[in-house]
Image (tube, helix red, strand yellow):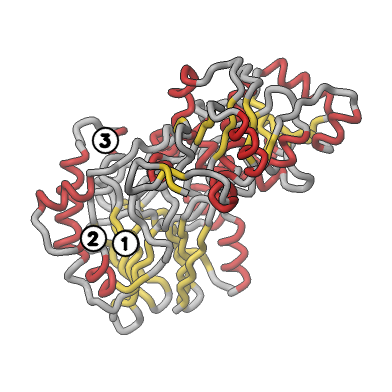
Amino acid sequence: MRVEQIYTGCLAQGAYYIESDGEVAIIDPLREVKPYIRKAEAHKSRIKYVFETHFHADFVSGHIDLANKTGAKIVYGPTARPEFDAHIARDGETFSIGKATIKVIHTPGHTMESACYLLMDENGDPKALFTGDTLFIGDVGRPDLAQKINKELTQEKLAGYLYDSLQQKILPLPDHIVIYPAHGAGSACGKNMSSETTDTLGNQKKYNYALQPMSKEEFIKAVTEGLTPPPAYFPNNVMMNVQGYESIDKVLKHGTQALSPEAFEAAANDTGALMLDTRSPQDFARSFIPNAVNIGIDGNFAPWVGALITDIRQPILLITDDGREEEVVTRLARVGYDNAIGYLKGGIVAWQNAGKETDTIERIDADELALRLQENPQLEIIDVRREDEFNAGHIPGAKNLILDYINDHIGEVEKQKTAYVHCAGGYRSMIFTSILRSRGYRSLIDVTGGFKSIAASGKFSITDPISPAAVK
């Protein structure tokens, strides 16, 4: 019996490949399904089942394409109502994978159809539990997402169901079984996830705050307090996972159309498409197409696209590093942005060689910022990090305008006033600056290296997280 976690850092997501005696089950696959098919072919095995732990909100699963390409049966837990052919399992129903067995355990709470899958060997001994978003390492699934689809399901009601699922279905299982969750640290599906992506149930009983002895009322309070609003694209992804979607092959075909500078410009003018530049912040700042927005592919690309591009049907034109066009279209499709309509062939160099207009963004390092602050202590500093990051230490007087809620902050930025923008390392600040630049804000200067460089320089007073006093 073979169990392999296929972890995707950009989404902090774990899919699973389970193989026994020539048969394979895939749990919670990503949108692109070729890697699973190739792996099975390499092992001369057949993909028999695609198990979904629930209707995912943070990514579009590959269940439909995988089933269509392999003939595998899609399986959901009880109460699921997908709008495509799938087997809706009973609580306790079992499925054979070669000599192994997978048992369905209905665990409502994160969502009502949520199910965990217990893997047993040929002797019937339990070995692993695939918990989806019911149980993470160090956390449990947030109980406020399903209410975006069904208003009658309050987060308190869902948290109560989750408590019952954990107490009655998961905690009685043997301590030695390995927990394989759908997500790790960095995912918006929980609030306290560990960077570890697997653990034993016994360890989680000791160290996971949500599994400690407590009443249902105490549990509900513990898991609902401190929740931040989920990304706006989550309900759209849920509906795509419920209703179905266009094949990834078609999405890739029209998204990777190579456009000359002239065709790219015409498409931008004719369609009103968003020009998305996925190069590094430094390359973008040096030269970019006016009104393009920068979200670098070498960061948490897909979640930021989902958080900041409010219309999932938005036509998108791409400016990418050479050879990364398919990767960008694939990662857009993972979160449901299927309307990429082409990319700039030859990139920014081709655009410049065609004599097209370009723009730049001024960037300075921490040392230069310190000099300018010394000359003018009233400089406007915009810190776009999360509130918890800001509270842990910041430049005194800095304005905390969190990138996640940029549309709520537009009115707090003066269009003609010079402001210096930073995040933790430079990725988010360029996203923020590029978005505002596309809306006519031309007085923003990006601070390279972000707060890490600011703090390391030793040239700034940093607000102490314990005291409001400024300390060196």
- In the picture, the quarter occupied by the N terminus is bottom left
**Which of disc 1 and disc 2 is earlier in sequence?**
1
Marks 3/2: CA distance?
Answer: 24 Å
Q: Is residue 125 above or below residue 403?
A: below
- Which amino acid does the dot numbered 2 rest on? Tyr
In the rendered image, residue 204, in percent from the top left (x then y), is placed at 27, 68
- Callouts 2 and 1 close, C-beta under 8 Å: yes
Residue that appears at 54% across and 57% down: 70
- Which amino acid does the dot numbered 1 rest on? Gly
Residue holding disc 2? 209
Return the mark for residue 147.
Answer: 3
**Which of disc 3 and disc 1 is earlier in sequence?**
1
Q: Residue furthest front?
A: 375
Tell me the SS state at disc 1: loop
Marks 2/1: CA distance?
Answer: 7 Å
Residue holding disc 1? 138
Viewer-side label of 1, 3: 1
- Callouts 1 and 3 close, C-beta under 8 Å: no
User: From this viewpoint, is residue 353 visible?
Assistant: yes
**In the figure, residue 397 lies in which quadrant?**
top left
- Callouts 3 and 2 close, C-beta under 8 Å: no
In the rendered image, residue 91, in percent from the top left (x then y), is placed at 22, 58
